[in-house]
Image (cartoon, helix red, strand yellow):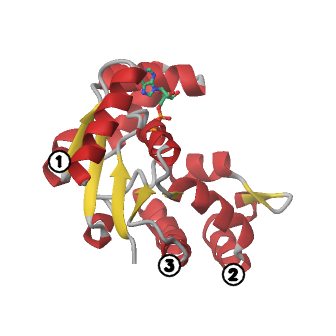
Amino acid sequence: MPKIIGLTGGIGSGKTTVARILEEKGFPVYYSDDEAKNIVNKDSILKEKIIELLGNEAYSDGIYNRKYVAEKVFNDSELLEQLNHLIHPAVKIDFEKWVASQTSEFVFKETALLFELKLNQQCYKSVLITADDNFRIKRTMDRDGKTYREVEAVIQKQMPEKEKCKLADYIIYNNSDLDSLQVATEGFLEDLN
Ligand code: ATP
């Protein structure tokens, strides 16, 4: 079985960018958030449970309405937890199937919630991508067209970077340009071997 490396970071930290670099180098990457988006549309039992929890508006024309769901759970941590309780076991099963089909020595699991869901316990190593808030906010504003306050509000709801740094086996700092991020990722890979 491949060794699983958890790749995580808060909003706009650069974890997807690092994941793409790793893919370019031939490492398989499982994108948990993207897969979760597929699963909520594909899994009919899950779909029913989500509608039961959040109402019919959770799907529009049979497609998961992310905007509606995000707005509904953003300020309701109990509801968010209930939703996560439905989605995460389905993602876990899908991930385990995916890992079993891989032949590489290392595979990466990209997820924003590695530590929050204690998924690091199933990993051989955990890697945190982090950057100062001002970089993360600016990059997310540019990428998503969000306002400063909107991004800041998300950061405030996520696990503090300090706590994540304590839990991570390896930290990649993304406070410079993309070339530096590439070099830092290569440095991590050298340490892995
Ligand atoms: P989210 O959790 O919000 O999806 P993420 O951690 O996956 O975020 P990315 O999407 O990889 O973050 O990066 C956020 C944005 O910042 C992207 O548009 C990416 O191209 C850009 N970016 C990442 N790192 C750098 C960098 N060092 N210099 C310039 N832009 C960067």
Instruction: Verify CB contact (< 8 Å) between mark 2 and mark 1.
Output: no
Q: Position of residue 158 (x, y in %)?
A: 33, 45
Taking the spot 29% from the left edge, 29% from the top edge, the residue there is: 131
Residue 160 seen in render = no
Quick one: label 2, few (<14), some, or many (20+) residues within 10 Å? few
Q: What's the CA distance linking mark 3 and mark 1?
A: 31 Å
Q: What residue did someone put label 2 on?
A: 45
Badge 1: residue crowd in 10 Å (few <14, some 14–19, many ≥20): few
According to the picture, the residue beneath numbered tag 1 turns out to be 163
* Residue at 41% over, 41% down: 15
Tag 2 secondary structure: helix
- The quadrant of the rendering that contains the C terminus is bottom left
Looking at the image, residue 70 sits to the left or right of residue 133; the answer is right
Q: Amino acid at mark 2?
A: Ile
In primary-sequence order, the first of circles 2 and 1 is 2
Q: Nearer the viewer, residue 193 or 128?
A: 193
Distance Cα–Cα, label 3 vs label 2? 24 Å
Mark 3 against mark 2, which lies toward the viewer?
3
Q: Locate residue 56, reporting x and y percent.
A: 75, 64
Q: Which residue is mark 3?
A: 100
Looking at this view, is 173 or 92 the one in front?
173
Asked whether disc 3 touches disc 2, contact meaning CB atoms under 8 Å apart, the reply is no
Task: Identify the secondary structure beneath mark 3.
Answer: helix
